[in-house]
């Protein structure tokens, strides 16, 4: 877990430069990408690259996906980010080749240090392994790794790493046959 220094619970952990980038991103994505049809995926990928995302090959990002900070995002070839998926990328998110993050999935890389009076922001990387499938409306907590070919069931809450080839579902997510 990476902890950011904050002088109070209300202080931003981001520098002025980062806050300007966040403002520009929050204007650009809906204005230049949010309306685009699916075939204009290359256009969306170009804008993600422009804002610092690391793109390998040709992943797919739905026009209604929400990405908090694209400079913390790495997408590999044929990775898929679905309709209204929310990549709350305060920390790193890496989605490997052929992995699918389905509609309305929430990948949350941030939390707070609730033991501290300033409640500092804490982030940890989320990794979605090759050929993994995260089903609709699943919620993945900071620091979790979803293994290769793993399947996370719909509406699951993933609090721990999921091994390769595993199937998990429920709240909290537990192995399923």
Image (tube, rainbow, N blue to C red):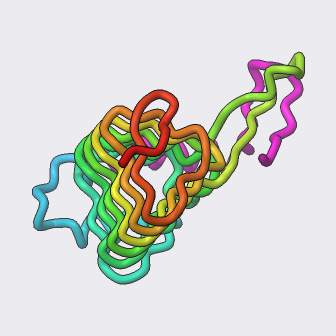
Q: Position of residue 4 (x, y in %)?
A: 81, 41
Residue 80, how many percent across, how many down?
30, 62
Q: Quadrant of residue 90?
A: top right
Residue placed furthest toward the front: 177
- In the rendered structure, which segment of residues is drawn in magenta? 1-29
Q: In this orientation, does residue 50 appear?
A: no
Q: Residue 49: where, in percent of width, then height?
A: 44, 70
The answer to whether residue 4 of the structure is visible from this angle is yes
Viewer-closest of 91 and 50: 91
Query: Is 63 placed left or right of 162 in the picture?
Result: left
57 relative to 160, above or below? below
Q: Is residue 74 above or below residue 110?
A: below
Residue 7 highlighted magenta (yes or no)? yes
Residue 8 relative to residue 168: left or right: right
Looking at the rendering, which quadrant does residue 136 occupy? top left
Q: Residue at x 46, y 68 (%)?
A: 148
Q: How many marks?
A: 0
Residue positioned 48% across, 37% down in the render: 173
- Please tell me which residue is depicted at 16% across the width and 66% down the height of the picture: 40
What residue lies at 30% left-to-right and 38% top-to-bottom? 154
Tell me, yes or no, whether the highlighted magenta stretch contains residue 22: yes
Residue 135 x, y percent position in the rendering: 30, 46
Question: From the viewer's perspective, is residue 6 above or below residue 53?
Answer: above
In the image: residue 118, left or right of residue 126: right
Residue that protrudes farthest toward the bottom in the picture: 57
């Amino acid at each position: 877990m990476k902890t950011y220094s904050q002088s109070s619970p209300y202080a931003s952990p981001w520098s002025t430069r980062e806050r300007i980038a966040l403002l520009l991103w929050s204007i650009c994505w809906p204005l230049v990408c949010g309306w685009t049809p699916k075939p204009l995926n290359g256009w969306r990928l170009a804008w993600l690259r422009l804002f610092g995302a690391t793109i390998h090959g040709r992943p797919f990002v739905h026009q209604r996906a929400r990405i908090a900070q694209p400079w913390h995002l790495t997408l590999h070839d044929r990775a898929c980010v679905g309709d209204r998926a929310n990549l709350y990328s305060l920390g790193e998110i890496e989605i490997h080749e052929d992995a699918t993050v389905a509609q309305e999935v929430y990948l949350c890389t941030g939390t707070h240090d609730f033991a501290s009076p300033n409640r500092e922001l804490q982030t940890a990387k989320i990794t979605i392994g090759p050929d993994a499938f995260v089903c609709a409306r699943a919620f993945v907590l900071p620091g979790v790794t979803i293994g290769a070919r793993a399947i996370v069931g719909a509406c699951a809450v993933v609090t721990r790493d999921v091994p390769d080839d595993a199937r998990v579902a429920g709240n909290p997510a537990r192995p399923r046959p």
